[in-house]
Image: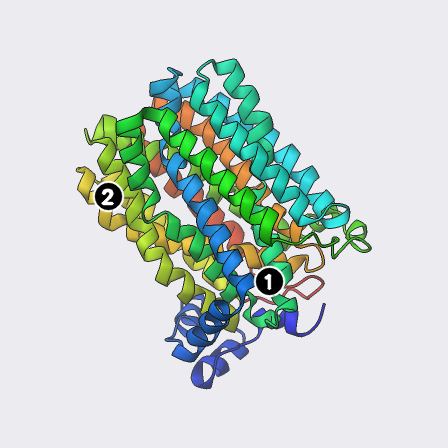
Amino acid sequence: MSSAERAPDRAEGIGLVGRVCQRPATNFFESTVALTSPVSMQKLVVPLRRLLRQPEFLIMILSNLVLGLAYSFVAPFYSMFGTIEVGMSNWAFGVFMTITSLSGIVLTTVLARWSDTHLSRRTVLLLACVCGAAGYAGYALVRDILWLTVIGSLALGIASITFAQLFAYQRESLPRLGVAAAEAPLYMNIFRLMFSLAWTIGPALGAWVMIHYSYRGIFLVCAGLFLVLLLIVWRYIPARPPAAATTAARVPLTQLLRRVDLLCYFSAFVLVFMCMTMGMMNLPLMILRTLHGTEQQIGIAYSVAPVFELPFMVYFGVLASRGNPGRLIRLGLIIAITYYALLYLVREPWHIYPVQVLSAAMIAVVSGIAITFFQGYIPDQPGTATNLYTTANRIGSTLGYLSFGTLATNIGYRAIFLVCVAVCGAAFLLLWLAREKHGPGEAGSTS
């Protein structure tokens, strides 16, 4: 790895911030304050100007918007679809989501490996988009639990690699388009920001479609958006041979996970995504059944956070480019603990709206900086690296689905958020144990 690719552990800021970040941090909060000092507008203007001038960047932005809109139409309503429309119990819904998630882990792991060694990103993306369109069309038309499980396990299991492959393609494209390695976290956060931008309107539109056209409507819209993404990939994303075809086999994923620091980060993100999944499944049902809210209020609740994600993602992306992103990730866990604690305390649906600002900050770190963080460990295998992140997501989601079904039945919707507080606390401890230099093969100095 080049010295530029190891730069996240060195200060990229200027003046006092640079001097503070260059010496070992004596205190987590001291280093975090230094790292989160105001950033110059130049740091933001130059990347945005470059993004708007290069057509390939615009295609990446459009792809993220379409995929984000597709998921934002259906993700907030999964638990309602399973328990209300299909008629599953909370436990049965948890088992259903667990089976489909486990299948997705297996399929995406194999496809991610092939995308790094044999297949072009374009080929994998085309396959994923076709499966996404077919799978969500199936969800719109089928209500038999067995067939829904088959569709979710196979078609949507393959489709779930779309996100990872888009981000792997974008990460591979940055050096070719003249972006320095130290600036990669900022650009990747901007791409992730575009995914989040869709969520500012998607859940509210999804709620409107569901009210007027039922669950069939939202799944058909999602299928249609996957077809739009299919056309974008077919027309604009070229078929390039895997960049790591000659080297990928040298670093097995199991060998990477033998590193204690990487294993701690991976395990911590499994726990974080477990909480995020339980929260995603739990919040709509708590609004409806505990707080006696409406479907429209669910849509509003899920539309608030993305509005704030936009500035948070740009800001945290700039910060990640100037110093070790591990500090920001630990800060994100502190925000997550606060967020879930406040959700436990809400008493009216509208109380959730301001709390969603904390959700935006948490997602900006966990879903933006963390992707580049994992990619930095395996720079020659961006597909495998991104899939390591998404595998943590899938395993965490699997645990979250199982836990949600059991906990909702036994302790109720509100108490689930207390469980999230405890689990995020455990994840923070793992991150604290793993506070080592970011980069393969480096010594383990603390940050």
Q: Which residue is mark 1?
A: 436
Q: Residue type at mark 2?
A: Ile
Q: Position of residue 252 (x, y in %)?
A: 76, 47
Q: Earlier in the sequence, mark 1 or mark 2?
A: 2
- Mark 2 neighbour class, 10 Å CA radius: few under 14, some 14 to 19, many 20 or more: many
For residue 74, above or below residue 199: above
Q: Element at badge 2? A: helix
Q: Residue type at mark 1?
A: Glu
For residue 392, above or below residue 85: below
Choose between 140 and 334: the one closer to the eye.
140
Q: Is residue 395 visible?
A: yes
Question: Foreground mark, 1 or 2?
Answer: 2
**What is the quadrant of residue 424 in the picture?**
top left
Q: Element at badge 1? A: loop
Choose between 191 and 216: the one closer to the eye.
216
Q: Residue at x 54, y 34 (%)?
A: 132
Choose between 193 and 15: the one closer to the eye.
193
In the displayed structure, does residue 124 sit left or right of residue 367? right
Quarter holding the N terminus?
bottom right
Q: Which residue is mark 2?
A: 352
Q: Position of residue 264 (x, y in %)?
A: 59, 50
Marks 1 and 2 sit apart, C-alpha to C-alpha, by: 36 Å
Q: Position of residue 229 (x, y in %)?
A: 52, 44
Q: Residue at x 60, y 62 (%)?
A: 436
Q: Residue at x 61, y 44 (%)?
A: 125
Q: Is residue 369 visible?
A: no
Q: Residue at x 43, y 73 (%)?
A: 44
